[in-house]
Image: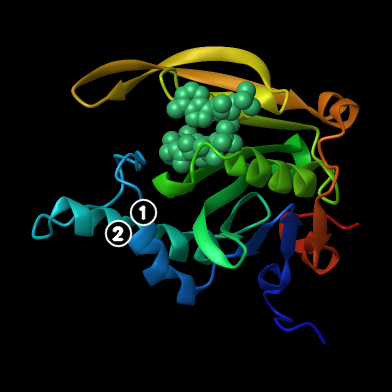
Amino acid sequence: MPAHPYWPLWDVRLSVADLQLRPMTEADQLPLADLLPDDLELDPQATRYPGLDEATNRRVIGFQSYWSSYGSWKPERWRLPFCVRVGGELVGVQELEAEDFALLRTVDSASHLAPRVRGRGIGKQMRRAVLALAFGPLQAEAAITSAWHDNHASLAVSRALGYQPNGESLHPRGNGVDTMTHLRLRRSQWLAAGGAAGVVLEGVPACLPYFGLTS
Ligand SMILES: CC(C)(COP(=O)(O)OP(=O)(O)OC[C@H]1O[C@@H](n2cnc3c(N)ncnc32)[C@H](O)[C@@H]1OP(=O)(O)O)[C@@H](O)C(=O)NCCC(=O)NCCS
C-alpha cells in the first residue's frame, strides 16, 4: 500500500545530482513563507487583504496558491508544486502545470530559488527534473514557458535546456505595459539533447489517472 493511497502525488520523488524534489505538503508552507524571495512577481489578480502589509499578503498568496493547487486539481487543469532541497536543505520551488493535458500534451512551469543559492546551476537542474517527468512517464509533446523580457535568469534556464523562441506578447505590468517572452521545447528536441540524463523518478505510475492518463 503506498503511503498516500488516495493522493499518490505525495509519493512522487524526483532527484538529480544533489537535488531532491518532493510535492509540497501543508508542513512545508511556513518554511516556504520564510523563503519567499522579494523579487518573485506574484499574480496581480491574487487576493490581497487591505488590512495586511505587503510582505504578509505575499505569504498569504503562497498559502492560498498551495491550497488551490490540490483543491482545484482536475485532469483538465493541474499544477504540481515541488519543494526543492539540496542536501536536505529547502532552497526553492519548482512547479509543473498543464491545461487539457491529455489532449494538448503541453506543460508549463514556474520556479523560484532563495537568492543565496542562485547562479549555481540549481535552476537548470530542477527544471530538468520536472521536464524528465513531463517528457517521460507523462509523455508530453511540448513544454512552454513565459517570462518578462528582462528576466534574464529565467530565460537563460529555458534557453540552456533547448527551448526555442515562441513569440512575444504585451501585458499590463505595474502602471504600464511590458513584453513577455515565450519559449517552447518540443519533445524531439528534448530527446535529442538527452535532457533526462541522471534524473531519477519515483512513485509516478500510481499518479497517471490524476493527469488524465490511462497508461
Ligand atoms: C529563475 C531562477 C529560478 C534561476 O535559477 P538559478 O539557479 O539562478 O539559475 P542557474 O544557475 O541554473 O542558471 C541558468 C542560466 O541562467 C544564467 N543566469 C543566471 N542568473 C542570471 C542573471 N541574473 N542574468 C543573466 N543570466 C543569468 C546562467 O548563467 C545560466 O546560463 P548558462 O547555462 O547559459 O550558463 C532564479 O534566478 C530565481 O529564483 N529568480 C527569481 C524568481 C523568478 O524570476 N522566477 C521565474 C519566474 S518566470
Q: In the rendered image, which residue does mark 1 sit on?
A: 36
Is 15 or 175 nearer to us in this picture?
Answer: 15
Q: In the rendered image, which residue does mark 2 sit on?
A: 59
Q: Is residue 51 above or below residue 44?
A: below
Let me know if residue 168 appears in the view.
yes
Let me know if residue 146 appears in the view.
no
Q: What residue appears at the point 26 percent right and 52 percent down from the top-left corner?
A: 47
Q: Does the residue labelled 2 lie within 8 Å of ligand 1?
A: no
Disc 2 on helix, strand or loop? helix
Left or right: residue 58 versus residue 62 is left
Q: Seen from this angle, which residue lies furthest bottom?
A: 1
Is 101 or 14 nearer to us in this picture?
Answer: 14
Report if the CB atoms under discs 2 and 1 are less than 8 Å apart.
yes
Q: How crowded is mark 1: few (under 14 residues within 10 Å), some or many (20 or more)?
A: many
Q: What residue appears at the point 21 percent right and 59 percent down from the top-left corner?
A: 56
Q: Quadrant of residue 32?
A: bottom left
Is 32 or 74 nearer to us in this picture?
Answer: 32
Q: Where does the C terminus fall, quadrant-wise?
A: bottom right
Q: Where is residue 181 in the image (x, y as percent from the top left)?
A: 50, 18
Residue type, mark 2 in image: Arg
Residue type, mark 1 in image: Leu
Distance, label 2 to label 1, CA atoms, is: 7 Å
Left or right: residue 44 versus residue 133 is left
Q: Position of residue 121 (x, y in %)?
A: 61, 39
Q: Where is residue 58 in the image (x, y as percent from the top left)?
A: 27, 53
Disc 1 on helix, strand or loop? loop
